[in-house]
Amino acid sequence: MNYKQIVEKAQESYARYFKNVEPLTEKKTNDVVVDRQKVEEVIAQGEAHMAAINKIKEEMKKEATEKAIESEEKIFGVPEATESLDHMTNDYVAYQEKLKDLKAKLEPFLLILIKVIYIKTIAISPFLYLKNKSVGVIL
C-alpha cells in the first residue's frame, strides 16, 4: 500500500464515522433560565392553598370541640351518671386504702412465716437426705 491509498482509506473511514454528526453551529450552555413571574405565581398559589387548609383545619377543630362538649353534657349532665361515677371512684379509693392497710399488717407475718419454713427445711433436710437419698427436697 502506498501513501495515497492509506490517505484515501483514512478519509473513507472518517467520512463513515462522522457522516451523521451535525456540525456545531452555536455554542451550547447549561444555564438554567427561570421565569421569576411564574415562580412568584406558584409561591402565591401555594400560600393561598395553605391558608385555605389552615382555615378548614380551624373550622374542623372548632366543630370537634363543640361536639365533644355536647356529648360530655349528654353523658355527665345527667345527675344519676355523675353520682354513679363519683360512687365508683370513692369505692375504688376506699378498696385501695384497705388493700394497702392489709398488706402493711400481713407483711411482718409473711416474713416470719418464710423464716420459719426456711429453718424447718434446713433442720429436716438431713433426715430427708438419709431417708430419700436426695438433696434439696423442700416441704
Image (cartoon, grey):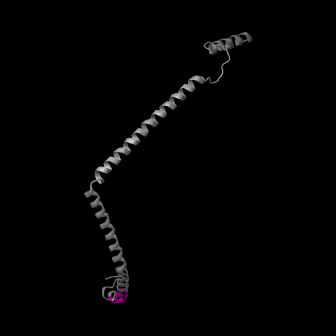
The quadrant of the rendering that contains the N terminus is top right
Can see residue 135?
no
Residue 125, picture quadrant? bottom left
Residue 86, picture quadrant? bottom left
State left or right for residue 94 relative to residue 33: left
The quadrant of the rendering that contains the C terminus is bottom left
In the image, is residue 94 part of the stretch drawn in magenta?
A: no
Looking at the image, which residue sits at the far left?
80
Q: How many labels does the image show?
A: 0
Towards the viewer: 8 or 1: 8
Relative image position of residue 126 (x, y in whole percent): 36, 89
State left or right for residue 132 relative to residue 11: left
The residue sitting at 36% across, 74% down in the picture is 100
Towards the viewer: 45 or 79: 79
Looking at the image, which residue sits at the far right?
3
In the image, is residue 125 part of the stretch drawn in magenta?
A: yes
The residue sitting at 29% across, 58% down in the picture is 82
Secondary structure mostly seen in magenta is helix
From which residue to which does the magenta span run?
119-127
Relative image position of residue 59 (x, y in whole percent): 41, 38
- Check the image and report above or below for 28 versus 138: above
Residue 27, picture quadrant? top right
Towards the viewer: 11 or 95: 95
Relative image position of residue 123 (x, y in whole percent): 36, 89
State left or right for residue 133 relative to residue 5: left
- Check the image and report above or below for 107 versus 36: below
Towards the viewer: 34 or 134: 34
- Check the image and report above or below for 94 versus 50: below
